[in-house]
Amino acid sequence: MTTHSPTAEQARTIDRAVDDLVRGEAAWAACGLAERRELLQRVRAATVAHAREWVRAAAAFKRLPEDSPLVGEEWITGPYPVLTSLAALTASIEALEAGRSPVDGFPLGRAPGGRVSVRVLPHGVWDRLLLNGFSAEVWMPPGVTEEEVRDRAGLALLHPAGTGGVGAVLGAGNITSIPILDVLYELYANNRVVALKLNPVTDGLLDVFCKVLAPLTELGAVRVLTGAAGAGSYLVHHPKVGHVHLTGSVETHDAIVFGTGEEGAARKRAGTPLLAKPVTSELGGVSPTIVVPGDWSEADLRYQAEHLATQKLHNGGYNCVASQVVVLSSAWRQKERFLAHLRQALGDAPVRPAYYPGSDARVERAVGAYPGALRLDGGRVLLTGLDPADPGPALTAEYFGPVLAVLELPGDARKFLDEAVATANGRMAGTLGVNLIAHPRTIDSLGSALDRAIAELRYGTVALNAWTGVGYLTATATWGAHPGHTVDDVQSGIGVVHNALLLDGPERTVVRGPFRPAPRALLPLRHGKPALSPKPPWFVTHRTAATMGRLLVDFAAAPRWTALPRIFASALRG
């Protein structure tokens, strides 16, 4: 078995940090709701003060030029979701202080299978203006009542003095808001003080993160650490650490929980983990995009190809929920035209460095497994001609890079959808997120069959005519794998994060978006609702994404009517 050991100095640093947290747990336990709310407000002020520094540091390790529109990704997936999460958590605490439930004011409804749903987007006038046409619901498991949803919302904040010890968070190396959001969830949802160990890829953010988290570190509730695998291993096995949360791959999870090599594999088979303490996780997988056949205009084909290219190439493809397999109907008469637009969109997307370790090797493994692999500009690879009976590793191995596969299944819209759902559930690795794309006329014709398909898909986030990344960016939505996994079959992880309403035991988030952008979405339609949203700023081809990202962070810091004209003007130029 391969072992990893920290340096003596790293071990001493970790020991001191954990000892500080053991003492800091009492200070955290003594913080009532008002004090915890005030700490959120101080973290919010620190995030605003250091947002530019945060984005510069992120762009530096991702090797993005300062004037690139792609810097917008760092605004929108860095300080922006942290600010919106801080605001939503603050609102939840205010509700509890007033003797109300955090879900009060959020409409409750019914979802297929007797589920209760909580509509979390849009919520308020700002959502209706900035994300017009987008919606999100959190679905609870079957059998949970509306009363139970209200009464249980709040999680550990219902009993703030009952702290849960010291937790270790192993930070992500790709999306820079993840480590901060995971720390907040451990503190506020689970009542654990936190040792955050950064992924070495993001060590350039150490100073910024220390500044953002300063109010919590000063209290003794958080410590931020760096180091490679040895430091992480020492931290998670520390006897005073009672819980571990990590973001990464299944391979990383299994190495931590069971160990590496043949000994680790034997432990996994025997169900005897090396790390015998609770572990939650948000892991990747093979996220599919199911394209339901229909009668599309040329503009629709072009736009949705661009949409799919974004699902693959946002952040260079280094997203746990990046689309990896496009599922198409072999009977769709517009299939070849759509694939031509998709090849064009993948090749035309802005070129960027392969910053994440191991990317080139993973790409080459994909090419080696598929002799017909098509290499496109910018290092992108498109895999076509997969045999549905034996599709190969594209359905079971997460490439975590700019590789996209196309799987064709037979049938018209209804038959194809049934087959696509069965394939996604039964043959693709992971359960983090799945996307569906369907024309409004097709949605109408499918009726309850589409609702049933969404309910049958065993994924933590299901997005219809939107990317599941919208669920990540929605603070009041949940983020994580479909429930039910165990450490010896972890799939895309165990537990959820974000979840600023602090819902107890949610099942999934369902996101919906407009099929076409404004101004086309405003034209009179026989099917579908009009929407004001133009091309979303997270599209990799958005020309003003950097400006949009900065303006959205500024708005999240201080929502106000006077900021909207500049945001709308920038959006329309995208």
Image (cartoon, grey):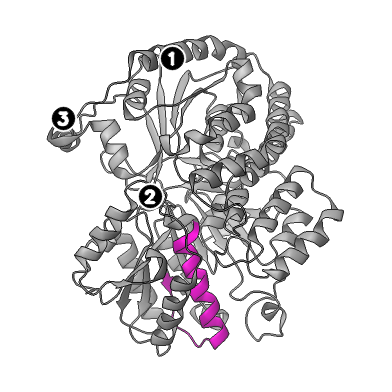
Check disc 2 and report the residue beneath it. Answer: 284
Residue occupying the point 15% across, 29% down: 1
183 inside magenta stretch: no
304 inside magenta stretch: yes
> Element at badge 1?
helix
Check disc 1 and report the residue beneath it. Answer: 13
Q: Residues within 10 Å of mark 3 (few under 14, many from 20)?
A: few
Q: Residues within 10 Å of mark 2 (few under 14, many from 20)?
A: many
CA separation in Å, label 2 and label 1 = 31 Å
Screen quadrant of the C terminus: bottom right
Q: Nearer the viewer, residue 197 or 188?
A: 197
Q: Main secondary structure of the magenta part?
A: helix
Direction from residue 534 to residue 417 in the image, left or right: left
CA separation in Å, label 3 and label 1 = 26 Å
Q: Position of residue 472 (x, y in %)?
A: 54, 50
Q: Farthest residue toward the bottom?
A: 333
Residue occupying the point 61% across, 76% down: 516
The magenta segment is 290-314
Question: Label 1 is placed on what type of residue?
Answer: Thr
> Element at badge 3?
loop
Residue 44 higher or lower than 65, as above or below: above
Q: Is there any visible trace of residue 296 in the rendered image?
A: yes
Question: Label 2 is placed on what type of residue?
Answer: Gly
Numbered-mark total = 3
Q: Position of residue 178 (x, y in %)?
A: 52, 41
Return the mark for residue 1: 3
Q: Residues within 10 Å of mark 1 (few under 14, many from 20)?
A: some
Question: Label 3 is placed on what type of residue?
Answer: Met
Residue 301 higher or lower than 319, as above or below: below
